[in-house]
Image (cartoon, rainbow, N blue to C red):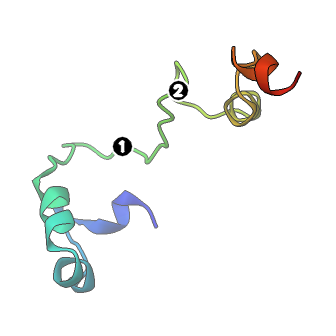
């Protein structure tokens, strides 16, 4: 699903099941202002400067910075 699937004629068009089962979330969504012009959906990865998630960034986030914690030498003596 895309955000644009829930917009009709410039207004939010949320499904009834969402409004009934999660009214607080539905209300937060409906309080979000909509753009005046069509804007394509885009994922925005906060850890990336340009918002794009690359394999390199994903790998570095999953594997950590590569520097061991200071307590590692105490445990792995």
How many numbered tags mark residues here? 2
Give the quadrant of the C terminus.
Answer: top right
Front tag of 1 and 2: 2
- Name the image quarter holding residue 54: top right
52 vs 77, left or right, is left
Q: Position of residue 13 (x, y in %)?
A: 21, 71
What percent of the width, then of the height, locates residue 46?
A: 47, 30
Residue 9 visible? The answer is no
Residue 24 appears in which quarter of the rendering? bottom left
Q: Residue at x 18, y 67 (%)?
A: 26
Residue bearing mark 1: 39
Q: Is residue 38 above or below residue 52?
A: below
Whether residue 28 sits left or right of residue 68 in the image: it is left
Nearer-the-camera pick, 65 or 23: 65
What residue lies at 73% left-to-right and 27% top-to-bottom? 60
Residue 66, relative to residue 9: is it above or below? Answer: above
Name the secondary structure under disc 2.
loop
Q: Are marks 1 and 2 in contact (CB under 8 Å)?
A: no
Mark 2 closeness class: few <14, some 14–19, many ≥20 residues within 10 Å? few
Answer with left or right where residue 5 lies relative to residue 14.
right
Question: Which residue shows up at 36% across the image and 58% down it?
Answer: 3
Residue displayed at 29% across by 67% down: 6
Q: Which residue is mark 2?
A: 47
């Amino acid at each position: 699903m895309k955000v644009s699937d829930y917009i009709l004629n410039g207004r939010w068009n949320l499904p009834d099941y969402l409004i009934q089962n999660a009214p607080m979330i539905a209300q937060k969504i409906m309080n979000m202002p909509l753009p005046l012009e069509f804007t394509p959906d885009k994922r925005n990865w906060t850890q990336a400067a340009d918002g794009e998630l690359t394999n390199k960034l994903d790998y570095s986030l999953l594997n950590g910075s590569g520097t061991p914690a200071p307590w590692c030498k105490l445990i792995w003596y």
